[in-house]
Image (cartoon, grey):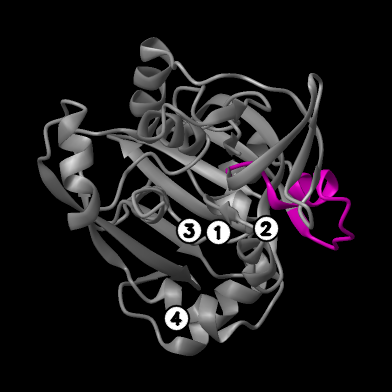
Amino acid sequence: MNNVILGLGLIGRIACNLHPDWVVAPFGGSRFYTFDPPLAENHIVVSDKISDYLGSLGYNLDVDFYKKSYSICGELLNEPQKSIIEEYVEKVYNTDSDLMALLLERNISSYYKNIKANELYKNFISRGFNNKVIEIKSIDSNNRLINTSGGVIEYNKIISTIPLNVLSKLLNLENDFKAKDVYIYDITTPSLDFEGANEVLVVDKHIDFYRTQKISDARYIFYSFQRLNSEYFGAFMNQFAILGETVVEEYVPIGDIPKLDDLEKVGIECVGSMARWDDFCDISTSIAKLLTI
């Protein structure tokens, strides 16, 4: 029986590195980390479980702190009331999930400052992989069979790093997974002061963007559910230049985080934020999970 990896984004590449004897179905590359700056968080949170692994890849494990603040009514809050966090969850995820509010309460985390996620992805691209490649048409999880372009094969375990709605289609399962498209803007400006924060989560519902990251001095990434123009940004900044703009479809999974017990019972482990339909499953969490498989 075969063990199979679905996807060759960053998490899929890490899975291939950890399991070179597993078969892989590529489904394309990363939607986020082929770009510079990348279209997702570029830092990896410190974890004892992954330090040895990252060190084995030759990375320097210098540590720094990543700080998030909340913006509401023009004020930056480092320790907001729970009600403010709940407002943000409702704005972004269209739910009143207590679990999401709890996960968001962590405002400061340690991260490996000399390891960037997009550089890690490019490193894996340059290394290549030795896994056998297959093309999957459908999966019969009840009988643990995979219909491939080369015939039907049996599987023992599957690591799925592809979006959960895509996996559901392969399994011929009905699903109502929904996600929001996001417009992403790369902007340079001297007009913003994050007061020491690396990222600001924007609670105000009348403001179209919901998140802003400072990626270097005077350079920021804005994330919005609406397409914005120069006039809109001009209301917040006196001087600025838009260096780049793109839209990513189905970027933020919305609704409550689904339970995946039924998939695990048939040998399918979903790893990664979109694979789990869980925006809080970061890179560090995903690597830690892969190390247990």
**CA distance separating discs 1 and 3:** 6 Å
- Write down the residue under mark 4: 102
Mark 1 surroundings within 10 Å by alpha-carbon count, few (fewer than 14), some (14 through 19), many (20 or more): some
Front position among marks 2 and 3: 3
**CA distance separating discs 4 and 1:** 13 Å
Going from the N terminus, do you reach mark 2 or mark 3 first?
2
Q: Which quadrant would residue 191 be assigned to in this image?
A: top left
**CA distance separating discs 2 and 3:** 11 Å
Q: Is residue 80 visible?
A: yes
Check residue 170 for magenta coloring: yes
Going from the N terminus, do you reach mark 4 or mark 1 first?
4
- Write down the residue under mark 1: 279
**CA distance separating discs 1 and 2:** 7 Å
| Residue 77 location (% of width, % of height) | 35, 74
> Which residue shows up at 58% across the image and 53% down it?
270
- Write down the residue under mark 3: 281
- Write down the residue under mark 2: 253
